[in-house]
Image (cartoon, rainbow, N blue to C red):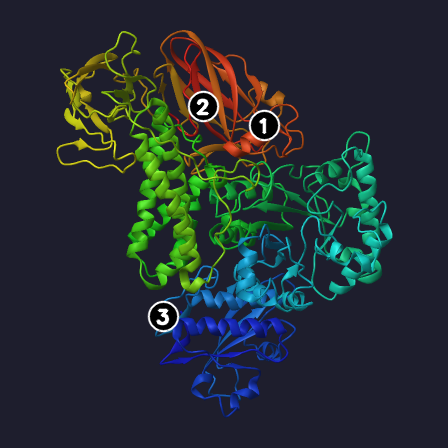
Amino acid sequence: MDKFTIFSNNIPATFLIEEESFEGIKLIGKTVAEDIQCVTGIMPEIIRGILDMQAENVSESSCENIILMATCGHSPVLDSLESLGKITTKDIEGKREVYKISLVDEPFPENGHVKQMLVIAGSDKRGTIYGMFRLSEMCGVSPLIYFGDVTPLKKNEIILKLDKEIVSKEPSVRYRGFFINDEWPAFGNWATEKFGDVNAKCYRKIFELLLRLKGNYMWPAMWNSNFSEDGPGLLSAELADKLGVVMGLSHHEPMCRAGNEWQQQYKKYSDDNTWSFLSNEEGITKFWEDGINRNKAFENVITIGMRGEADSKLMPEDATLSDNIRVIKKAIKTQDDLIRRNVNEDISMVPRMLAIYKEVEDYYFGDEYTEGLKDWDELKDVIFLLSDDNHGHVRALPTDDTRNHPGGFGMYYHFDYHGAPVSYEWVNCTRLTKTWEQMSLAYESGVRQMWIVNVGDLKLNEYPLSFFMDMAYDYEKYGEKSVNKIEEYVYGWINRQFPGVSDEQKKDIAKVLEGYTRFNAQRTPETMNPDVYHPVNFMEGDRVWRDARDILDTADRLNRELRDEALTAYRSMIYYQAAASLNNVLMNVEAGMNRELALRGCVYANHYAESVRKRIEEDIRYVNEFHEFNDCKWKHMMSSDHTNFRSWDAYNWTYPTVSVVSPIHGPKAAVSFRGEKIVNYGAHWQCPPAPVSYGFTRPETTEVFLDIDSRGDVSYFYEIENDIDWLICKNAKGRVEVSRSRVANLIAEDDNGTSSDGRKTVCFAKRGELITGKIEAKAKVKISFDDGTFTDVDIIFKADKENYPDGYSRENLYMEKCGIITVNAECFHEKKDVRGAGFKVVDYLGKSGKPAIKVFPSTSNFDKKEILDGKAPLVKYNVLVEDDGVYTLDFHLAMTNPIVKGGLLKFGYAVNESEIIIENALKDGYFTDFPCRQWCDDVLSHEHTKSVKVSLHKGINTIALYAGDAGAVFDKLVLCREDVILPKTYLYRQ
C-alpha cells in the first residue's frame, strides 16, 4: 500500500496550482488549504509553478511532498509527468467532471528533494474541483463545514493510504443543483445582515457548498433579488463562472433575466410595463436580448418559454389551450432567434431548458385538437424540466414514446414550497426514503439530464440536500437497486458530521433524525393543529405524545451530553429544528387533549392549557436561541411562521387556542377508559352506559388506563373493587385533589398516589395465561367525596386470547377485533412476480414511518387485461372474520401521483379467489394543483384512501392485491364490518 504524507511534524505538504490553471481552481485551492488548516492548525503553502520551489520563502522540507491540482489541457506539469511516463490521464480525458488521484514517487528527476507528488487531475474544471474537495474529505473535512458548522477533528498527522489510483465516475445526472427560494424573511434577512445583500460574498459560500456536494448547477434567490445585478453588478455571475457553477434561472425567468428585472427596468425597453407577448412583444424582446448579451460569456442553461409574472399564468383564464400554446411558441421562436444571433448560430450547442411546470404541463401535452410542445421540432434539443407537485411527489414522467427526446428530461423537486394547499417553509420536512423512492422512479423513467431541488432558505435542509446531491451524482450507488439502504446512508452521514462521538450517541442522533423528520413529513409543522391527532380513538393522541416526547428527550439529552465541535454541529443542523418541531407536535396534541376534556368539563383540561402555554414559550425560545447560537451566525434562519396555518400562507396563523375549565361547585366526577369515547359521571338514573375497555382484545396491549377525573371543586377518595382473577389493578386506591386556586397546573402527585390537578389515572394489567377466549368482566369504581356524598361507576373489560387455526400465526393471519381488521401491507403471506417485476417491502416508506410495498422495477406497468387475467404481480393476505357479512375495505396508499398524465393509480384486488376487480385510487379528473379537492386533501394527509365493499364468510378469507399503474405505494388495508363505525384517526393501524 502506498502512502502520502499530507501533514507530519508540523509540516504540511505544499500545494502546486499553476498559473495556467483556471481561476476557479486557484480560488478553491485556497479554500482547500484553509480546510487543511482547520484540521492541522497550519496552512499549506501554495506555489504556482516548479520554479517557485526554489523561492527563498519556500523551505526545502515543505517541498518533499507536493500536491498537484491540475486540469487536463491546462497544466504543463501534468503534461511533463505524462511525457516522463510517470502518469497517464488517458482514462479521464474527454470525460465529464471526472478526477483522478495518483501518487508519483520522485516526479522530477532534476529536482531530487521532491520525494512524492499527489496528483489530482481533472478531466475539466469541475472534475479538478471535485478532486480537490475529495482531498478535503479524505482529511476529515465535511462538505458541511460552513453551512453545518462541522468543525473537523484536529490531527497531528495526516497520511493517506492509497491501494491504487482513485478514478471517479462520470456523474449520473448531467446538471445537479438546488434553488434558493421563498427566501424571505429567513434567508434574505440573514444574507443582508451577514453579507450586506444577497451578493457575491454570500454566493461564494453557497457555490462552495454546491461544489463540495458535487453539484454543478444552480438557480439563485429570486423573491427580491436580481442575481446578475446584485453582485454588485455582474460579480456574482462572474464568480459562478470562475468556479464552474452553471447558472440557470427559475421556471418563470427566461433568457437570463430575473423575475424582478422587468418592472425595475421596463422603461429602457417600452412605455408599457405589461408582461404580455401579445401587446408588448417588441419591448420584451429587447429586454431578453440584453439579458442574453449580458450573460452570454458565462456558462448557463438558458431558461426559455414564458409564464406570467410572479409565478402566474401567462394569459387570462378565458384563453384557450390553443391560444396559450400559440403565444408560447411565438415567444420561444423569438428567444431561439436571439440565441442564434447573439450566442451561437448552432443553437443545439447552447444548453436550454423549458420548465413543464403548473399550467405549462397542459401546453406540453396539448390535446386532441392542438399539438403540444412535446412534439414540436423547435424544442428537440431542449431539456424538458418536469416537476413534482410542489410537495415531493413526481408526476407525468417520460413514457416509452417520449423517453428518447434528444434534449433529455429534468426534474424540479421540492423540499420547500410557498403555495397551495398550505405552504411549508420553516424547517426540514423531508424523509430520505420518500426522496429516494420518488427520484429513483424519475431516474428509471429517463429523467437524467437535470435534477434541481427547491431548498427554500437552504439552512436546515443540509441533511436531505446531502442525500439528493449524492443520489444525483452517483445514482448507481444510491438508486433503485439499493432498496432499504437509507439507514446505511444515514449512519454514513452521521459519521461524516460527528466523527468523534460514541457509537451510542450516533444511534441517538439517528433516532432524532428519523423521529423529527417522520413527524414533519407525516404532517408538516405549518399544517399541524389540535384536530390532526385524535385525542381519544386508539389512544392516538397518547401514542403520538409519548413517541414525540421520547424523541425530544433524546434530543435534549444529546444537547447536554455532546461537547465542543460535535455540539456545535448538532445544534446547527439537528437540535433546534428537531426540538422545535417535536415541541410543536406536543403543543398541538395537548391542545387537542385540552379541547376534549374541556367539552367533558374536566378540570384536568387546565393541565393541558398550562402545558400548551409553556410550549408556546418554548417555541419562541427555540427560535431565539438558534438565532443567538454560534455568535448569531444563523440569525433569522428560523424566522418563518410555522404552525396552525388557517389558509395557504401565514396570513392568519395562530398558536393553538385552549380552554380553561372552572370546576362546578359540588361533587362531580368523570370516569373513562383511555382510548374510548364513553364517559360516566357516576350513578344516576340517566347516566350513560358503563365505560368499556376493548384494549385487552388486542394481544399487543399490555396495559389499560382508566382516568378518574373531577368536574367539581370537591376532592375525593376512590377505590377499585376488582375480583377478576386475570385483571391486575396497580393502584387500586387513591385520592383526587381539586383546588379552585389552581386553575391551571402541571402534573403533581405525591408518593401516596394523590393528585392535585383533578385527575388520577389507574393502570390495569392482565394475566394472559388466565384468558382462554373471548371474555367480559366487570369491576367497580367507588368514589367518596369530602362532603360526605358517594357515587360509583361500573367498568367493563373485554378480553380475548387469540387462538390461531392450525398452520396459522400472527405472521400470516389477521384476526378481527371489535369488527375491525388492520392489515399491514408489508406483512403478506404470499407473493407472485411477473416478468421479473414484483412487490418489495421498503422500510420507512409508510405514512407513519412503517414499511410499505411497491412494485420493482418501479416503472413496471400492468394494463387492465393483464390484471384481469391474473398476469400482474400480486401479494396475498389472510384475514379471519367472526361472521358472514359485508365489510368496508379501505386501501391506504402513500401519497404519490400517477406517472402518466391522466392516470388514476389503478390496481386490482380479489377476495377468496373470486373475480378480480379493478379499482382506481384516484377519482376521475384528478390533477395536481389547487382546484383539485382530492389532491389538496391527500397532499395534506399524505395518503390516498380507496374504499370498496366486500362480502366475507365466517372464518379465513384471502385478499389478493394486484399491481397496476406504476407509482402506486401500498401502506395498509383496513376492514370494518358494515355495522361498525371505524373510529377516526390520522395514523394508527389499531
- The three-letter amino acid code for the residue at tag 2 is Leu
**In the image, residue 404 lies at what x, y percent?**
70, 43
Q: Which mark is residue 973?
A: 2
Q: Quadrant of the N terminus?
A: bottom left
Taking 97 as reference, is 705 left or right?
A: left
Mark 2, other Cα within 10 Å: few <14 / some 14–19 / many ≥20 = many
Q: Secondary structure at mark 1?
A: helix
Q: Earlier in the sequence, mark 2 or mark 3?
A: 3
Q: Earlier in the sequence, mark 1 or mark 2?
A: 1
Mark 1, other Cα within 10 Å: few <14 / some 14–19 / many ≥20 = some
What distance separates the C-alpha of mark 3 from that of mark 1? 54 Å
Q: Secondary structure at mark 2?
A: strand
Q: Is residue 99 visible?
A: no
**In the image, residue 901 lies at what x, y percent?**
67, 32
**In the image, residue 941 lies at what x, y percent?**
50, 32
762 or 100: nearer the eye? 762
What distance separates the C-alpha of mark 1 from that of mark 2? 20 Å
Taking 185 as reference, is 359 left or right?
A: right
Q: Secondary structure at mark 3?
A: loop
**Tag 3 residue:** 154
Which image quarter: residue 37?
A: bottom left
Q: Nearer the viewer, mark 1 or mark 2?
A: 1
Circles 3 and 1, Cβ within 8 Å, touching? The answer is no
Q: Residue furthest bottom?
A: 56
- The three-letter amino acid code for the residue at tag 3 is Lys
Which image quarter: residue 290?
A: bottom right
What residue do we see at 31% from left, 41% from top?
A: 550
Q: Is residue 305 above or below residue 201?
A: above
Which image quarter: residue 591?
A: top left
- The three-letter amino acid code for the residue at tag 1 is Gln
**In the image, residue 408 lies at what x, y percent?**
69, 48
**Tag 1 residue:** 934
